[in-house]
Amino acid sequence: MTATILIVEDEEKLALLLSEYLGQAGFSSFCLHNGLEAISWIKEHKPDLIILDLMLPGRDGLEICKEIRSFSNVPVIMITARVQEIDRVVGLEIGADDYVCKPYSPREVVARVKAVLRRMQTPEQGSGKGLELNELCYKATYNQRDLGLTVVEFKLLSILKNNSGRIFSRDQLMEKIYPDRRIVSDRTIDSHIKNLRKKIALLAEDRELVRSIYGIGYQYEN
């Protein structure tokens, strides 16, 4: 079945170009150019994924994404022309699944679309293969081999994996790992993640399950 992609982008030529590339990749797409039209269209047509520009006439992408999350888990890829806005996208926890900065290659966006849809459609659960977490004993295995994680490393991996695709800032991870608000450096998270990634790399040489998003934080990707 062909996946339907909604493109909410006020630059009509850019939206059309992206639509053409998605079509060549086998997707069906529809374009909207005003933020005020998005919510009603989404509720009526239920797209499989939304490409949502941050700056839109009528209503901005942050507000739209937050409202989408009040009634749907449809994956959302945010588009922004300003790198500094990424902190808002991440920090407000609006529920976007990925982001792309302008200017971008349409091929890159198509690749992101495929990756996000793949994560949604093929979760790694109960197969004995890939990464599996045992929350009761804080044990993580990859292809049934123990990763040998510390409790903090396990908690970090669990948070990231259970929110696959979402980008967490260091502060957000610190809040979850240290809810008592003890005084620790934000680089403490970096150190734990560094050790975690080394342990994963020993058993999963061909995959980067925990991605470092430069200047922002971390993300788990199937």
Image (cartoon, grey):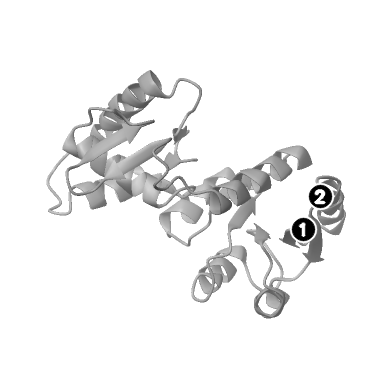
Q: Is residue 8 visible?
A: no
Q: Viewed as shown, does residue 162 lie left or right of 6?
A: left
Callout 1: helix, strand or loop? loop
Callout 2: helix, strand or loop? loop
Is residue 163 depicted above or below 94 in this figure? Answer: above
Relative depth, front residue between 211 and 119: 119
Residue with the mark numbered 2 = 26
Q: Position of residue 115 (x, y in %)?
A: 61, 43
Residue projecting furthest to the front: 127
Tag shown at residue 141 = none
Relative depth, front residue between 18 and 148: 148
Q: Are marks 2 and 1 in contact (CB under 8 Å)?
A: yes
Q: Is residue 133 visible?
A: yes
For image coordinates 59% across by 48% down, the residue present is 116
Q: Amino acid at mark 2?
A: Gly
Residue at mark 2 to residue at mark 1: CA–CA distance: 7 Å
Position of the N terminus by quadrant:
bottom right
For image coordinates 15% across by 51% down, the residue present is 181
